[in-house]
Amino acid sequence: MCRNIRTLHNFEPPATPDEVRAAALQYVRKISGSTKPSQANQEAFDAAVDEVHAVSLRLLDRLVTKAPAKNREEEAAKARARFAKRMAS
């Protein structure tokens, strides 16, 4: 599950709220051990996703760096190359 959580800081264009929410959802799924909670746990699950999403947005807004922003397409190409190399071995 956690492989879907990607670094969201210092990219151009910046991460969207939807990307941050998707990462929050993956995080809550991982720590709860459930991809789809039971009806009894749905409210707690949804509240946790909302809270992690809000905290993550605040964190990303407050982080500072002197490094130049990374290009999303270039980073995706590097990730694809690493994956292809891993699968070829």
Image (cartoon, helix red, strand yellow):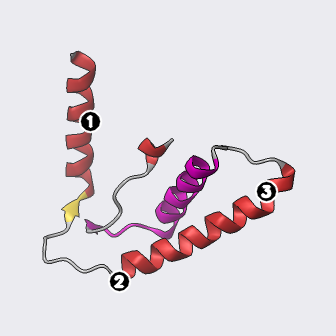
Decide: marks 1, 2 in contact (CB < 8 A)?
no
In what element is the residue under mark 3?
A: helix
Identity of the residue drawn at 19% across and 68% down: 69
Question: Which residue is denoted by mark 1 in the rendering?
Answer: 80
Does residue 27 sit above or below 66 in this rendering?
Answer: above
Residue 43: x %, y % from top left: 79, 63
Using the image, tell me which numbered label, if any, was put on residue 62: 2
Kind of residue at badge 1: Arg
User: First in sequence: mark 3 or mark 1?
Assistant: 3
Question: Which residue is denoted by mark 3 in the rendering?
Answer: 42
User: First in sequence: mark 3 or mark 2?
Assistant: 3
Kind of residue at badge 2: Arg
For this orientation, the residue located farthest to the right is 40
Residue 2 falls within the magenta-colored stretch: no
Label 1 and label 2: CA atoms lie apart by: 30 Å
| Magenta stretch bounds | 11-32
